[in-house]
Image (cartoon, helix red, strand yellow):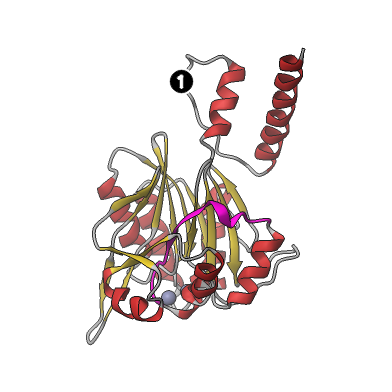
């Protein structure tokens, strides 16, 4: 009897979860047909990954505080990864509390690049977690960040590599300017035969970043490209070219955010129609 009760409770919870997932336009996994429908639901729930936008200058009509910067919480069953840490540690902390973030699960922090609007919350998160998480930073930034956070378990990133189950870094990408260069890494989430790309600012170029993803996983579908694309000063035809290039690379859904710029975002919204996704502060993507 007790087992029956537990199973019915589990089924109810799964039904609730599935309803919520449909509501948030979950991209459900097509699990192989060897499992019964009920077991399949359990399997889907067990390896679900959820991305929550904790920090963003793109406001929401929610109770979170908006400010310039970016941070996303990527949560799997066992562990979580924090991608970037926003521009103000206190705002990040308050938003985390409002979203009921469980820092005990935090195993990895990935810093896309050493710009203040992506790193300013790092010190506080390291303190709150007793410096336990590994911090993945690109090789170019490692010396500065090691000096700033000597107790942090900093790991250097140069080439594409796995960080956790189903989670990769693109490696350090570079864009050269006449007198300077700018470097950055992005996060790739793997699920079945699909990949989901999450970017900080895409300073080396969003098209170049997606090309890198395609070269690492040529057989996989690029289901979603989300995050900052840094196109605030790009003229309209330049944005249109980028939009076409992303379509040409086989990107299915697009969610521009953070530093993409309002005009560029509107162009993408028109160009991508039902495949455009809003990614404001507080947004949740279930994979
Ligand atoms: Zn930046
Ligand atoms: Zn930024």
Quadrant of the image occupied by residue 95: bottom right
Q: What element does badge 1 sit on?
A: loop
Q: Residues within 10 Å of mark 1 (few under 14, many from 20)?
A: few
Q: Provide residue 107's location: percent of width, then percent of height.
A: 46, 54
- Is residue 69 a member of the stretch shown in magenta? no
Q: Is residue 186 visible?
A: yes
- Which residue is at a point 45% across and 66% down the rendered structure image? 200
Please say if 249 is above or below 14.
below
Ligand 1 shown in quarter:
bottom left
| Residue at which label 1 appears | 32
- Which residue is at a point 43% across and 78% down the rendered structure image? 115
Residue nearest the observer in this picture, 237 or 243: 243
- Is residue 106 a member of the stretch shown in magenta? yes
Residue nearest the observer in this picture, 37 or 75: 75
Q: Provide residue 9's location: percent of width, then percent of height.
A: 75, 25
Residue 195 falls left or right of residue 12: left
Residue nearest the observer in this picture, 5 or 254: 5
| Disc 1 within 8 angstroms of ligand 2 (CB) | no
Q: Provide residue 94's location: percent of width, then percent of height.
A: 68, 69
Q: Is residue 182 visible?
A: no
Quadrant of the image occupied by residue 270: bottom right
Please say if 249 is above or below 33.
below
Where, quadrant-wise, is the N terminus in this rendering?
top right
Q: Provide residue 67's location: percent of width, then percent of height.
A: 62, 76
Task: Give the extent of the magenta segment.
Answer: 100-114
- Which residue is at a point 40% across and 81% down the rendered structure image? 148
Which residue is most to the bottom?
179
Q: Report the number of discs.
A: 1
Quadrant of the image occupied by residue 73: bottom right
- Which residue is at a point 62% across and 19% down the rendered structure image? 38
């Amino acid at each position: 009897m007790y087992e029956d009760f537990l199973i019915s409770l589990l089924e109810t919870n799964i039904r609730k979860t599935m309803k919520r997932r449909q509501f948030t336009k979950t991209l459900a996994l097509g699990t192989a047909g060897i499992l019964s429908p009920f077991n399949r639901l359990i399997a889907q729930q067990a390896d679900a990954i959820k991305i929550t936008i904790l920090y963003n200058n793109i406001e929401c009509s929610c109770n979170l505080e908006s400010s310039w910067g970016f941070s996303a919480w990527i949560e799997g069953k066992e562990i979580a990864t924090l991608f970037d840490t926003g521009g103000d540690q206190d705002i990040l902390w308050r938003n985390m509390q409002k979203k009921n973030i469980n820092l005990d699960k935090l195993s990895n922090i990935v810093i896309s690049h050493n710009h203040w609007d992506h790193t300013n919350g790092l010190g506080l998160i390291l303190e709150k977690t007793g410096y336990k998480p590994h911090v993945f930073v690109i090789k170019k930034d490692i010396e500065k960040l090691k000096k700033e956070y000597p107790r942090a378990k900093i790991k250097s990133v140069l080439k594409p590599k796995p960080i956790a189950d189903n989670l990769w870094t693109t490696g350090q990408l570079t864009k050269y300017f006449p007198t300077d260069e700018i470097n950055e890494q992005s996060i790739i989430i793997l699920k079945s035969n699909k990949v989901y790309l999450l970017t900080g600012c895409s300073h080396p170029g969003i098209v170049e970043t997606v090309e890198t993803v395609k070269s690492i996983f040529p057989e996989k579908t690029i289901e979603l490209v989300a995050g900052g694309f840094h196109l605030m000063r790009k003229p309209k035809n330049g944005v249109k070219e980028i939009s076409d290039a992303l379509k040409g690379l086989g990107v299915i859904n697009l969610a521009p955010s953070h530093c993409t710029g309002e005009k560029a975002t509107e162009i993408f919204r028109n160009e991508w129609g039902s495949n455009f996704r809003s990614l404001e502060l507080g947004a949740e993507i279930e994979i």
